[in-house]
Image (cartoon, rainbow, N blue to C red):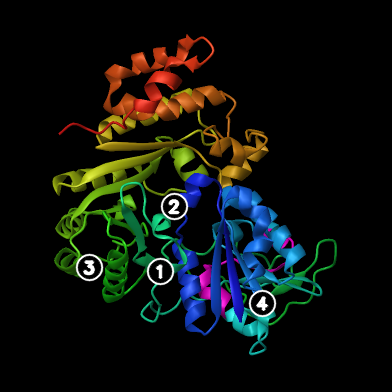
Amino acid sequence: MNLAIIQPVADVRHAARAYRDEVALLAAVLGRAGHAVTLAVLAPDEAGDAARALAEAQPDVILLYVEGLSADAAAKAAGSAASAVGAPLVAFGPHARLCPDACLSLAGAEAVAVAPGPWVVPEYVEARGGRIDSLRTPGLWVKCETGVMRNAAPRPPASLGDEPLPNRGLYTSDQTLDAAGFAPITVARGGEGPSPTEPTGAPGAPGARGSASAPGKPPAPPLPGPAAAPAPWPVLHRPVEAILEEMHEVAAEQLDLGGWSVGNARWTADPAYLEAFAERYAREVGLPLRTVLHAADVTPETAALLARAGCNEVTLPLGSASNLIRTEVLGLDASAEAVAAAAAALRQAGIRTAVAVEIGAPYETPVTIDETVELLRRLAPDRVAARLHWPEPGSASERIAREHEWLVPDPASAYLAGGPAVVPASLSAEALIEAAELLPYRVLRPRVVPLLRLARRVRIPGKGTVYECLVKPFLVPPVRKA
C-alpha cells in the first residue's frame, strides 16, 4: 500500500524540532512490511494544504499524528485531505490516545489508535487488505455500521528485540537536533500502565471493551473480544546493540551531533540493563548524555552508572510543591522526598541536576508558588526548568480547569503566544507569566529578583517595559555556581 503520514506542528518552533520517535518507528515498521511510506510535516500555515502534500503520494490510507497543541492544525489538515484525496484516515499519537472520540470526528477518520501507533496501526493496515477483520484490531477504535467498535488495548510485546530502527531519514537533519546539538533517542517503552483512555464498563455498555455503540441508540450486543482489563505495561528495553547501531547511523549523518537525550523516564529501572548500556556507551559512543528520570528510579548505584556512561545532566520532574497539584492534577507520583534523595545521589556522582516545575496548573495560588520556590531552594538543583502549565486536552488537568472555568477561551493559541492556558481564580495571566519567568532566579539568583520586577514595571514610552526591551533579550537562564 501507499501510506502517507501527516504530522501537523503547532508553530515554527515545533517545526524546527519536529522529530517524533513514534512517527519514525511506525514508518519503519510499515516499511519493513513492504509498504511505501511518505511523511509530510506541516507548519501551521501549511496545515490546510495537506492535499498538495499528498498529491504525489496518492495514499491508500492517511495516518495523522496528533498532539494536543497541534490538534486544531490536525483538524484543518484532515479536512483538506478528505476533500482532495478521499483516502481513509487513521489518527494516532498522544492526543489520539487522550481524546479518541474527538479524533474519530475528524473529516475522513476511519479509526483512531488508543495505544502506541507502531504497535497497532500496522496490524490495522494489513487487516484492511482482507487478511483479518479490521474492526477487531486491538488498540483501535473503528467506525462501523452500528457506531464505533471500541477494542481493548493490545497486549504488550514480549520484547523489543524484533523492533526495527526508527526511520529518521523521513526528517531533515535540522528537525532531529535541539539547539545544543543533542539528538533524542528512545531506549525503552512502557512503564506508565494502561492508557487512560481505555474504555471501561460492562461488556455491551456504551464505551465498553469489545462493544459497538452509537450515541442516542440502545447498547449493541457485545462483540467477540477480550473484556478483561490489561495489566500495567512493563518497562520494555530495546537491545543495547540496536541502540548503539542507531546512534552510529545518526552520528554518520550529523557531523555537529553534540550528544544524546535519552528516554523514556523509566529506562533506568533495571540496574542490569543500565550497567550493560553504560559500559558499551562509554566505550563505543562517548558523547555527553542527558536524560529525564523518574525520581524513584534514581539510587546511588543508578547515579554511579549514569556517571560512568558520561551523563552530565538529569532532569527530575517535580511539578509543584503542592501534593494536590502534583498528584491529582499533573499525575506525578514522585514525592518531594524522592526528588530530594535522587538529587542528592546525582550530586554525589558528579551529575548536574535540573528540577522541572510547572506554573499555573489548576489550584495554583500565590502560596503554592512560594512553597515551590522554598522547596526548590532546599533541593538545591543546578538548574530549574520552569514553564507555564499546558493542560493536555482530555487530561485531568484540562477537565478540572474546564469545570472551574479557569481555561482561557483559546488555550493553545494563548500558550503558544507565551501566555497561560489556565488562569486560576486567585491569579492573573500577568502574574503567572511573571512567576514562571522569575522562578529560576528566585531559586538561584534571589538578589536580582527585585531588579527584574522593577524592570517589568517601568515602561519606555511607545515601546514597552524595560524588561521586554532591554533585559529579557539578554537574560541567560541561571545555573548554580560551582
Q: Which residue is mark 4?
A: 60
> Which mark's residue is nearer the viewer, 3 or 2?
2
Checking the image for residue 277, the label placed there is 3
User: Which label is found at residue 234?
Assistant: 1
Q: Earlier in the sequence, mark 1 or mark 2?
A: 2
- Numbered mark located on residue 56 in the image: none
Distance from label 4 to label 3 (Cα)? 41 Å
Residue drawn at x 34%, y 30% as measured from the top left: 440
Q: Nearer the viewer, mark 4 or mark 1?
A: 4
Amino acid, disc 3: Phe
Q: Residues within 10 Å of mark 2 (few under 14, many from 20)?
A: some
- How much space separates mark 3 and mark 2, taking CA atoms? 26 Å
Residue behind mark 2:
17
Q: Taking the image as drawn, is residue 427 in sight? A: no
Tell me the amino acid under the disc marked 2: Arg
Q: Amino acid at mark 1?
A: Pro
Closer to the chain start, of discs 4 and 2, is 2
Q: Secondary structure at mark 4?
A: loop
Q: Tell me residue 474's x, y (percent).
A: 34, 26
- From the top left corner, tell me how far across and down residue 431 is, in percent: 50, 22
**Rendering quarter of residue 3:** bottom right
Separation of marks 4 and 2 at Cα, in angstroms: 28 Å
What's the magenta region? 103-122
